[in-house]
Image (cartoon, rainbow, N blue to C red):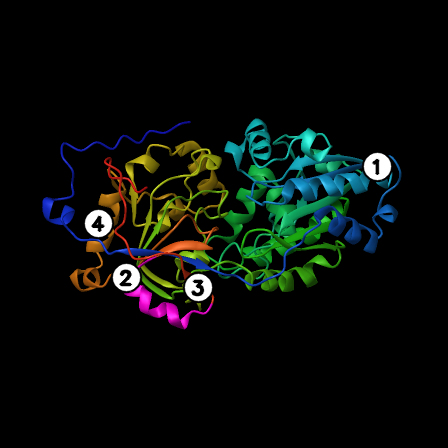
């Protein structure tokens, strides 16, 4: 941990008048999402492998690399294990390649640690893990951009791309999925940095990923892509196998399918959104931009349709699985000393530098505890808003099934058939330290 944040106050910057601000009462509610869910993951994987005739795609004894990234995907250990089992059944020798760009502090050990924490180990998936940051340059695109791939994947006899297909930003047509793991994930730190550097200032990142993928497909031995589409509860709704040739045509449609299943809050406008935590395991961006409505424009300054309007975003803590990488804080208005003390600036800045995007690594206002963070956020919305504050408190931007809503939002519940109250209105409950229970 390389935290260098020391936030100290001779006395609290929250004045007695602010401290006396009455925060609204809140009610717990449950949002019910409708969508498919797989009951038997190994059977779903086996069915897809048989459909695409996995056995015919490599020779007996072939060394088959299976990509696994750093996302907090609930089913990834089971899916990876099922793919490895199918490869062995067909006579292959499977192994796992960490495919997460610069994450894990851009070190092999850091990436293996992340895999272990998401449940991917040699024991759980039944295949060894080969981790390195060494890459091979596959060639250059017509515009001159070099394309890289992990050396173990390059040396394999076959590569199976595995990743969840999900929106990563509000404007990308393929989002975070199979072509991205083939180029940015397998490209390690240098590949991730190169693609982002060539796309700075434009909305062309995802089109550049597709172009880079075509080069990877031509010069590396990709035989399949296996995509996971999660439902709103972050559990697998569908698993689909695609041939390397199908990916550019079919992945945009799968991204649109995933869009419809992403959990969102039922309110389009809020004064204050309080998140108990943020982290790389809850969203690739730390906090999901489709939930908090940031950014409002794409890299070229064009407005993004459908983004919610939230005046103030408050985040109280950082997940342990983030290993101090607080990327995404740049989209937060107020945070706590508790979160700031957990920041590993090397990990966060490595992520930001590799993505050529410094904004998500900026620090918001840091206050001593949860109560003062919420009070300052509320007051900054103005006295008129404070008198009828539209506030929601949720665990994080991935888990939105249950949340708290303020008294001003209660009348809207009758218009939301998929939301039910779980209790009565009650004050926000703070510990003696000023942190929320």
Q: State if disc 4 and disc 2 touch (CB < 8 Å).
A: no
| Of 256 and 244, the residue lying toward us | 256
- Label 3 crowd bin: few (<14), some (14–19), many (20+), radius 10 Å: some
- Mark closer to the observer (4, 1): 4
| Labelled pair 4, 1 in contact (Cβ < 8 Å) | no
Of the numbered discs in the image, which one, if any, rests on residue 260? none
Q: Residue at x 16, y 38 (%)?
A: 12
Q: Which of marks 2 and 3 is nearer the N terminus?
A: 2
The picture places residue 302, in percent across and down from the top left corner, at 42, 66
* Quadrant in which residue 173 is drawn: bottom right
- How much space separates mark 1 and mark 3, taking CA atoms? 51 Å
Residues under labels 2 and 3: Cα distance? Answer: 15 Å
Based on the picture, tell me whether residue 406 belongs to the magenta stretch.
yes
Would you name the residue on which mark 1 appears?
Answer: 62
* Residue underneath mark 3: 419
- Quarter of the image with the C terminus in it: top left
Q: Distance between the residues labelled 2 and 1?
A: 62 Å
> Can residue 60 be seen?
yes
Q: In the displayed structure, does residue 240 sit left or right of residue 295?
A: right
- Range covered by the magenta-colored residues: 405-417
């Amino acid at each position: 941990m390389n935290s260098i944040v020391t936030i100290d106050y001779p006395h609290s910057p929250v004045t007695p008048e602010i401290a006396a601000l009455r925060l609204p009462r809140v009610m717990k509610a449950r949002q019910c999402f409708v969508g498919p869910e797989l009951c038997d993951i190994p059977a779903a994987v086996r069915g897809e492998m048989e459909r695409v005739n996995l056995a015919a795609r490599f020779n007996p004894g072939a060394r088959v690399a299976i990509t696994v990234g750093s996302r907090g995907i609930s089913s990834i250990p089971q899916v990876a294990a099922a793919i490895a089992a199918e490869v062995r059944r067909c006579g292959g020798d499977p192994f796992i390649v960490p495919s997460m760009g610069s994450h894990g502090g851009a070190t092999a050990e850091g990436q293996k640690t992340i895999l272990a924490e998401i449940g991917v180990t040699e024991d759980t998936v039944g295949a060894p893990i080969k981790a390195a940051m060494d890459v091979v340059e596959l060639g250059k695109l017509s515009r001159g951009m070099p394309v890289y791939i992990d050396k173990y994947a390059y040396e394999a006899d076959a590569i199976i791309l595995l990743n969840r297909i999900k929106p990563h930003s509000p404007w990308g047509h393929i989002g975070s999925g199979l072509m991205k793991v083939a180029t940015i994930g397998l490209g390690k730190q240098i590949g991730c940095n190169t693609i982002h550097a060539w796309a700075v200032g434009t909305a062309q990142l995802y089109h550049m990923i597709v172009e880079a993928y075509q080069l990877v497909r031509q010069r590396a031995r990709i035989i399949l892509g296996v995509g996971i589409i999660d439902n709103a509860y972050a559990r697998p709704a569908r698993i689909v196998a695609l041939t390397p040739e199908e990916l550019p045509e079919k992945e945009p449609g799968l991204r649109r399918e995933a869009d419809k299943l992403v959990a969102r809050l039922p309110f389009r406008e809020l004064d204050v959104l309080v998140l108990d935590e943020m982290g790389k395991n809850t969203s690739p961006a730390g906090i999901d931009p489709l939930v908090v409505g940031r950014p409002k424009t794409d890299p070229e300054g064009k407005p993004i349709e459908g983004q919610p309007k939230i005046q103030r975003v408050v985040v109280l803590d950082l997940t342990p699985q983030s290993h101090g990488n607080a990327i995404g804080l740049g989209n937060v208005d107020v945070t706590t000393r508790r979160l700031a003390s957990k920041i590993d600036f090397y990990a966060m800045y490595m992520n930001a530098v590799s993505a050529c995007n410094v904004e998500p690594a900026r620090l918001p206002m840091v206050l001593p505890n949860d109560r003062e963070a919420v009070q300052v956020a509320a007051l900054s919305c103005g006295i008129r808003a404070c008198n009828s504050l539209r506030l929601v408190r949720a665990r994080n931007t991935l888990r939105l099934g249950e949340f708290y809503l303020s008294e001003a939002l209660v009348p809207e519940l009758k218009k939301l058939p998929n939301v039910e109250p779980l209790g009565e209105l009650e004050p926000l409950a703070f510990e003696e330290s000023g942190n929320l229970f």
